C-alpha cells in the first residue's frame, strides 16, 4: 500500500529550542511529519546561521531561550520575510506580546495534533507555498 505524501514533504522548517532533550524529541516529531528538512538550532546565533544559508518555509520558535534572550524579534523578522512562524512557550502566553502575523502560539508540552494543525496553518499563510529562498537582506 502507498501512503499519501506529507503536506510538509517539500518544506524546510527552522526549529529553535534551547533545551537539548526537548529539541531532540521535537526534531524527530517534525521529521515524522514528513518535512523535507529540519534545521535545529539551540540559540539565536545558530538560527541566524541557518537563515544565512536560505530562508526556511516555516519556523517553530521556543520563546524563552535562557540568559534573557527570546525569539520574538527573530520571529518578527521571519514573518516580515514571508516565513510561517509558530511560537512555543512553557510560560503563560497571556503575559507576552507576540509579533503580528504569527500563525499560532503553542503551550508546552505540545500535543501532536495541535502541532500538525498549527504548522499547516502556518504553511497556508506564507507568501509562496514552494519556496526555500536564499537569505534575505531583511534578516
Image: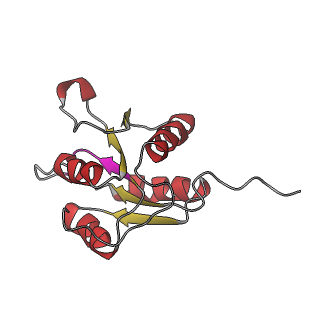
Closest to the observer, 120 or 136: 136
Q: Quick one: which residue is furthest to the right in this view?
A: 1
Up the image or down, 113 lies above or below 23; here it is above
Please state the horizontal and vertical placement of residue 94, each as a whole percent of the image. 23, 23
* Residue placed most toward the observer, 30 or 130: 130
Residue 92 visible in the picture? no
Q: Is residue 134 above or below residue 130?
A: below
In which image quadrant can residue 96 be found?
A: top left
Residue toward you, 92 or 56: 56
Colour basis: secondary structure
Q: Is residue 54 left or right of residue 74?
A: right
**Residue that appears at 24% across and 62% down:** 43
Q: Position of residue 41 (x, y in %)?
A: 32, 64
The answer to whether residue 93 is magenta is: no
- Magenta segment, which residues? 59-65
- 20 relative to 121 in the view: left or right: left
The residue that appears at 32% across and 76% down in the rendered structure is: 53
Viewport quadrant of the N terminus: bottom right
In the figure, residue 138 lies in which quadrant? bottom left
Q: In the shown orientation, is residue 31 left or right of residue 108?
A: right
In the picture, the quarter occupied by the C terminus is bottom left
Q: Residue furthest front?
A: 128
Where residue 58 sits in the image (x, y, percent)?
41, 54
Residue 9 screen position, x and y as percent: 60, 60
- Could you tell me how many numbered marks the image carries? 0
The residue at the point 38 percent across, 68 percent down is: 133
Looking at this view, name the residue that lies furthest to the top. 94
Pick out the residue farthest to the left.
Answer: 68
Amino acid at each position: 500500500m502507498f501512503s499519501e505524501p506529507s503536506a510538509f514533504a517539500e518544506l524546510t522548517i527552522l526549529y529553535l529550542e534551547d533545551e537539548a532533550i526537548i529539541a531532540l524529541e521535537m526534531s524527530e516529531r517534525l521529521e515524522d511529519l514528513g518535512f523535507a528538512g529540519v534545521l535545529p538550532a539551540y540559540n539565536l546565533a545558530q538560527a541566524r546561521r541557518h537563515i544565512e544559508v536560505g530562508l526556511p518555509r516555516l519556523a517553530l520558535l521556543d520563546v524563552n531561550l535562557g540568559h534573557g534572550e527570546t525569539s520574538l524579534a527573530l520571529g518578527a523578522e521571519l514573518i516580515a520575510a514571508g516565513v510561517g512562524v509558530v511560537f512555543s512557550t512553557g510560560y503563560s502566553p497571556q503575559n507576552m506580546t507576540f509579533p503580528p502575523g504569527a500563525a499560532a502560539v503553542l503551550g508546552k508540552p505540545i500535543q501532536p495534533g495541535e502541532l500538525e494543525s498549527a504548522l499547516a496553518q502556518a504553511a497556508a499563510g506564507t507568501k509562496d507555498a514552494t519556496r526555500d529562498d536564499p537569505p534575505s537582506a531583511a534578516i
